[in-house]
Amino acid sequence: MKKKRAIAVLQILRRTFTMPKRIEAKRDPFKTLIVTIISQNTADRNTARAFERLSKQFEIKPEVLAKAENSQIEETLRVAGLYRNKAKAIKRVSTIILEKFHGSMQSILSLTFEEARKTLIELPGIGPKTADVVLLFSANQPTIPVDTHVNRVSKRLCFASPNGDYDAVRMNLQLLYNPRDYLAVHVLLIAQGRRYCKARRPLCEQCPVNMHCPSRGL
Ligand code: SF4
């Protein structure tokens, strides 16, 4: 029953929103990692601006960022919040990838899914969501990163238990969908959360999946 509802919701969301073309392509894992570090608690627009400024100043490679001056990285990231912490995390992650993984993330991504995820999470400043973003977008691994929108929308649709933590929500969603749909589920639940299922005052009347939502009108 829940699975049928989940599939119906995904079909509607596919018709409602367009999947951005650029994310279909396999992304450079190190760039994905850096973008995701910058994006923590930061609006998309400011993340893009900060990454663009960083890219203009430095080649986005571990060997370059590991040797860059902290203050120079900070300067490029000022448009993103917590830029001092993020600059520090970028430099530390770059140094570890350079020294421990021979400057390439391929040695991490060629591990089994669970080992790769664990190794990524052990890197400084990298949490489960960042690890899952890298694994999904850059290694085509079967995982659904759970950001604030995915978490909220999944719970309102009763696809995940209300008190479920990050991994519980991720597993609940993964059990409902086919792995080939994980990327679409991640992207489309975010779009749904931004446009209709807003944190405050969700637009239930206009929501395209309201006939499948037990929380309609909350
Ligand atoms: S009906 Fe309301 S609560 Fe349910 S998914 Fe749509 S906006 Fe969210």
Image (cartoon, grey):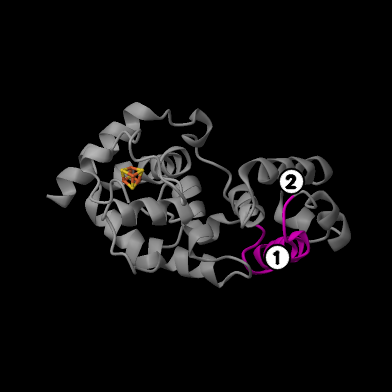
The quarter of the picture showing ligand 1:
top left
Neighbours of disc 1 within 10 Å: few (<14), some (14-19), many (20+):
many
In this picture, residue 176 sits left or right of residue 195: left
- Give the number of the disc on residue 128: none
User: Does residue 144 appear in this view?
Assistant: no
**How far across and down, in percent of the image, does residue 104 sit?**
62, 56
Disc 2 residue lies near ligand 1 with CB under 8 A: no
Q: Amino acid at mark 1?
A: Ala
Residue, disc 1: 89
Q: Amino acid at mark 2?
A: Ala
Q: Which residues are magenta?
A: 80-103
In this picture, residue 99 sits left or right of residue 176: right
Residue 189's image quarter? top left
Neighbours of disc 2 within 10 Å: few (<14), some (14-19), many (20+):
many
In this picture, residue 180 sits left or right of residue 139: left
Mostly what secondary structure, the magenta segment?
Answer: helix
Q: Residue at x 65, y 62 (%)?
A: 102
Disc on the earlier residue, 1 or 2: 2
Residue, disc 2: 50
